[in-house]
Amino acid sequence: MSAPPLVHRPLGQRIPDRLHAVSCSLPTMRDVIGYEEKDPAVTAHLTSGYPRFVVHPLLRRVADGLRRADAALDGREIWLCAGPAVADALQAHLGASAEVLPLAPELTALALPAGSTAETSRRARHYLQHTGAFASSRAAEAWLVARGELAAAAAETLFPGRSADAHVRDRLAGWFGHGLAADDVHLAPSGMAATYAAFQAVNAVQAACGRTRWIQLGWLYLDTIALLQKFTAAPASDYLHHADVFDLEGLERLLSAHAGRVAGVFAEIPTNPLIQTPALPALAALCRAHGVALVLDPTIASPLNVDVLPHADLVVNSLTKYTASEGDVILGAAAINPGSPLAAPLRPALAAASRLAAVHPRDVARLAAQIDAAPALITRINQTAPRVIAFLETHPKIAAVFWSGHPDSALNYSALARNPENVGSMITFVLRSDVPVASFYDRLRLAKGPSFGLATSLICPFLYLAHYDLVTSEAGRTELAAHGLAPDLLRLGLGAEPAEDIIAALAEALV
């Protein structure tokens, strides 16, 4: 298990330096702001990036090829979807007479009508972003190779034979444990696609009982928040937010106030970015007493670190993190707790929802080739994390440090940890108010970009990338403050580098 040396990486460099990399370097705060504000001086350098936010060059190349081949498509915006069902759903969402162009089982184009407004384009992008259903870069690559527009697919190690899918699902079932069968694990083209499939499955089961409302517990990842806000049956009334993950009495009052109407509660274990863990056994008991499905996402820590399946009805997980530790695969998974009282109706519902967004076989083969490295990586990170945390907690220029052992929820987390040393890779911290975040960030020699769970440590000013609209407005900063979130909070996902090297880089930037 190794990672590249800790050096400054130029703007736009892929992390890792491969065609299908999931992250890219944003080495200065000025670059981060330019990226968010679509500054051409920054975006011109971005040859790749986190796929839901930067359309992969291969997808753009497919769209350009379609326009060249058909004059009727000239000048029209084209979105590449993970299969025909996604394109059909997007068309229905837009309510526009878009043209669906089947290209391959995992690659379908949706051409917006000529003269479509910028708002239509924005809605199309957001739909694919929130549901995680953009076409895979490998699906685009395969189509381009088949048409002779690429000589060959990029060289990479793939799982041998035809059993990659079974290998991945078997490994995941074993990691979740508790007798989970591989057939109860469903792969999706991204973690958000898995989340959306779970959301749809719960709705399919619960809506028949008049349950259409969802509760967001705590502060979740931005696209999960958007999913709950925008895709409930009647968003104005069906989206509920209980901000304090520790206040289960308040949650019980909310459930009672909406008795018989709540379909599900969605929670991250622990949360992103404050690494907060609720009292999960009590949360699960509360949901089951009210007939509410509990959907849990343990991606921040990994199911190898925390045991959440017995408390959930459904678990979703981004396989892009830890499982694909080399940083060049986007995939996700959703799994049913076989002990859930809702397991029987959820099984066919999740199977149906998971089929809508198609998974490209080469993505699975690439994931299967590296999945067995995940336990060793996580073991190494768990050994590194306490030393890095101790350094940050005792440094005079650090105002606050958040991690799984933070006093607010250390007991709740330890009750779920598979071993006492399984602290996880995620650390977020805030600099003292008189320490300029740009000076620290710009000097830091760690890789700087979105994502985590790679063999390469990654740091980013998380709220600038996830909630730039809130960071840059007075009302938004007030909202963040109400949730205990400092706009300049930095998120560090530890990788395989030696602890002493990571600490040295941090110390150097904090001088």
Image: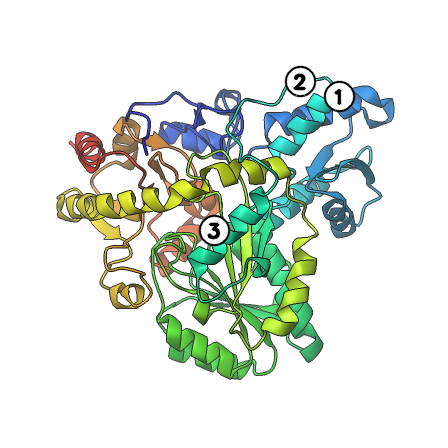
Residue 365 horizontal/vertical position (percent):
56, 37
Name the residue: 71% across, 27% down.
143
* Residue 237 appears in the figure: no
In the rendered image, the vertical position of residue 104 relative to residue 382, given as above or below: above
Side (left or right) of 146 relative to 407:
right
Q: Who comes first in sequence, dot 2 or dot 3?
A: 2
Q: Check disc 1: other Cα within 10 Å, few if <14, some if 14-19, many if 20+.
A: few
Tell me the SS state at disc 2: loop
Which residue in the protein does label 2 denote?
150
Mark 1: secondary structure: loop
Circles 2 and 3: CB distance less than 8 Å? no
Instruction: Give the labeled residue for mark 3.
Output: 171
Q: What's under tag 1, amino acid-wise?
A: Arg
Amino acid type, label 2: Leu
Task: First in sequence, mark 3 or 1: give its number.
Answer: 1
- 177 versus 399 height, above or below: below
Q: Is residue 1 visible?
A: yes
Quadrant (top left, top right, bottom left, bottom right) of the C terminus: top left
Residue 448: percent from the left, percent from the top?
36, 32
Residue highlighted by disc 1: 147
Residue at mark 3 to residue at mark 1: CA–CA distance: 35 Å
Classify residue 202 as left or right of residue 94: left
